[in-house]
Amino acid sequence: MISFTFHTTPLKANTASRKLESKKSDQKMGIVEEAHNVKVLGSGEKTIVLGHGFGTDQSVWKHLVPYLVDEYRVVLYDNMGAGPTNPDYFDFNRYASLEGYAYDLLAILEELQINCCMYLGHSLSAMTGVVASIFRPDLFSKLILVSASPRFINTDDYYGGFELEDIEQLCRAMESNYMAWVSGFAPLVVGGDMDSVAVQEFSRTLFNMRPDIALSVFRTVFTFDLRHFLSRVTVPCHIIQSSMDMAMSVTVSEYLHRNLGGKSIVEIISTKGHLPHLSAPEATIPVLLRHISHDITDDVA
């Protein structure tokens, strides 16, 4: 297991359907919970909220949740557009940026009357947590960011992992034959073959998405640029990534660490793929539990 710790200096710092659409988190009580299939497990004093990434749903946390429910209040939810959600609620304009997802997260916290929580997000939801923490830093005690990237496309001075043409080719393949695209994309991202349980599970949740919605979310995820937001993040961030991830280099996690405005720590784990909590739970879950239970201290921040 490889870990990186660097010193950072803290700096200062549209829904689904018309009935769900709101500015920030002023949605009506009850609507948000139903729309996002919110589940609350456990009864601990501290609350942890789990957010899934593109192509998955809340079931992706099945290996982690049993270790949390005895000690924490655990909140699970589905991002709008995920397979278990109502596709009629997906607003293509709202979810063309991560702000739409961040407002949804804040609405869930408001509806559940959560005044402070730990937030563990994967990929898309990791950066959703980053944005939400800028809007309402008081609601988050820490962010645990798994496979988080502020930008996937390379620039002259930044290596995100993809060229713009790579993303355009993937989008054209999705439009042409979604089933064939999933069959190629899933093993590549998970880091296994089609016979592996993790690849089959990721394929299942990808197939559960409506193809036009999957394309929209994919385009949003792989074309956003949140680098300019990072200095405004003051909530402590625990950054966790696989050592071998085709979607992003370990330099991305180091970039996050250098540019976040508050305390942060990076841990690179000896796993393969963009979804280590699904493909290698035996190695990943202990790391997640350690970061959940331990805060960043001044001597390692």
Image (tube, helix red, strand yellow):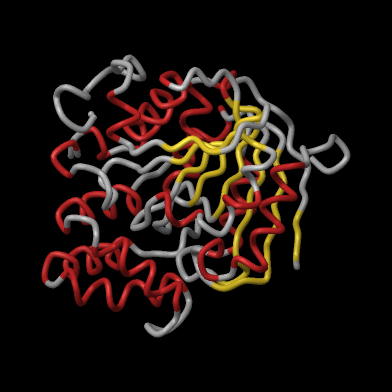
Q: Which of 175 and 255 is in front in this view?
A: 175
From this view, report whether residue 220 is shown above or below residue 94: below
Q: Is residue 104 left or right of residue 253?
A: left
Q: What residue do we see at 57% from left, 50% from top?
A: 65
Q: In this view, does 41 lie to the left or right of 104?
A: right
Q: Where is residue 220 in the image (x, y as percent from the top left)?
A: 29, 47
Q: Where is residue 235 in the image (x, y as percent from the top left)?
A: 63, 29
Q: What residue do we see at 65% from left, 36% from top?
A: 72
Q: In which quarter of the image is residue 106?
A: top left
Q: Is residue 9 left or right of residue 221?
A: right
From this view, report whether residue 153 is shown above or below residue 15: below
Marker count (numbered): 0
Q: Which of 20 and 157 is in front in this view?
A: 20
Q: Where is residue 80 in the image (x, y as percent from the top left)?
A: 28, 41
Q: Where is residue 23 in the image (x, y as percent from the top left)?
A: 29, 17
From this view, report whether residue 200 is shown above or below residue 262: below
Q: Nearer the viewer, residue 231 or 46?
A: 46
Q: What residue do we see at 42% from left, 70% from top?
A: 189
Q: Quadrant of residue 205?
A: bottom left
Q: Residue furthest right?
A: 299
Q: Dividing the image into 4 quarters, which one contains the C terminus?
A: top right
Q: Dividing the image into 4 quarters, which one contains the N terminus?
A: bottom right
